[in-house]
Amino acid sequence: MMRGVTYAIIVALMLYAAAIAALYLLQDRLFIVASKFDSSPAQAGLPEAAVQRFRTADNIELTAWLMPGDGRFLAIYFHGNGGALPERTERIRQLNRLGLSVLAVEYRGFGATAGRPSERGFARDADAAYAYVRGLGISPNKIILYGESLGTGVATALAARSAVAGVILDAPFSSAVDMAADRYWMFPVPLLMKDQFRSDLAITKLDMPVLILHGEQDQVVPIEYGQRLSALGGDNVTFVPIAQAGHVVLGEPEAQDHVRRWLSEISTLPAAHDKTELKRDAETQTPAGR
């Protein structure tokens, strides 16, 4: 009998090890789902949008759609998992109707863009988009970052290393590894997961206004993850739960009202400065001989 028990334990351990190996090897497909759907803005129903192209630090050409607005701010839009830009037209319009110009960025590995989706790659994509906007002559105090779902991890990380006027996070997680660890509680997820999107660490570095929107009925990224992220931020973070709403709430009238008020409030704040400019200013003010 002991031999049978020992054999069963060995088989169970082998199956567990095989499951861990499969989870590690297949995690790219499990956590980042990239749509390859591609079309022009006009074909997708956005004839007003113009295609922009620019390259990342690792020489991948990105496509972005630029939608002009009539307000002060330009929003760099980082979309969520799954759908590519042509499947995000309604979100682009929603941002635009709020008075924002919009630069909607397509990630590497999505649509017709080359490359493999990854957290590090998305960070390079975000940096390239930010540099492109700055190259258009748009100052940091006119740049808003809007991220939805997976894109909140991209937007939060970018805001931690770049100067912007504010950040809007729609259906954010505290971190991707938090969600994965809860879902796959039986596995050592923190040790296995490569793309952890640690927004919980990045948000502690943000000093610009941050607006977090989250649907109370969100079944994709439950609201407790957004609440957890908000609690880690400072007084600059405003958390707005949207009743009876699911995943990604920008289309909800209540959410739009909050965004309009928030945009009006941050319009009166002192201008943001580029961090390199702040460093240079600090150096010029350092007393001689120190």
Image (tube, rainbow, N blue to C red):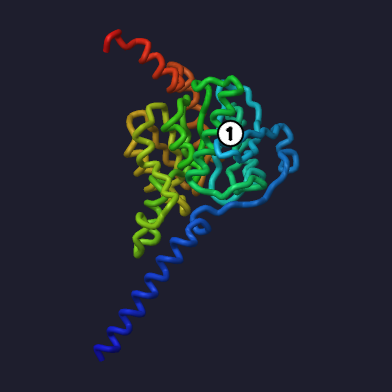
Please, is residue 201 above or below residue 134 in the view?
A: below
The residue at the far bottom in this view is 1
Q: Quadrant of the C terminus?
A: top left
Q: Is residue 258 left or right of residue 89?
A: left
Could you tell me residue 53's position as x and y percent?
66, 34
Could you tell me residue 243's position as x and y percent?
45, 44
Q: Nearer the viewer, residue 125 or 70?
A: 125
Q: Quadrant of residue 21?
A: bottom left
Q: Quadrant of residue 7?
A: bottom left
Could you tell me residue 181's position as x and y percent?
37, 56
Please, is residue 200 above or below residue 50 in the view?
A: below
Total count of labels: 1
Q: Is residue 254 left or right of residue 227?
A: right
Q: Is residue 13 left or right of residue 135?
A: left
Which residue is pictured at 28% across the width and 83% down the height? Answer: 6
The residue at the far front in this view is 289
Could you tell me residue 78's position as x and y percent?
54, 39
Q: Nearer the viewer, residue 250 or 273?
A: 273
Q: Nearer the viewer, residue 64 or 221?
A: 64
Q: Secondary structure at mark 1?
A: helix
Q: Label 1: how many residues lie within 10 Å, few (<14), some (14-19) or many (20+)?
A: many
Which residue is pictured at 46% across the width and 50% down the height? Answer: 218
The residue at the far top in this view is 288
Q: Quadrant of the N terminus?
A: bottom left
Q: Amino acid at mark 1?
A: Leu
Read off the residue under disc 1.
95
Which residue is pictured at 39% across the width and 19% down the height? Answer: 279
Q: Is residue 175 left or right of residue 96?
A: left
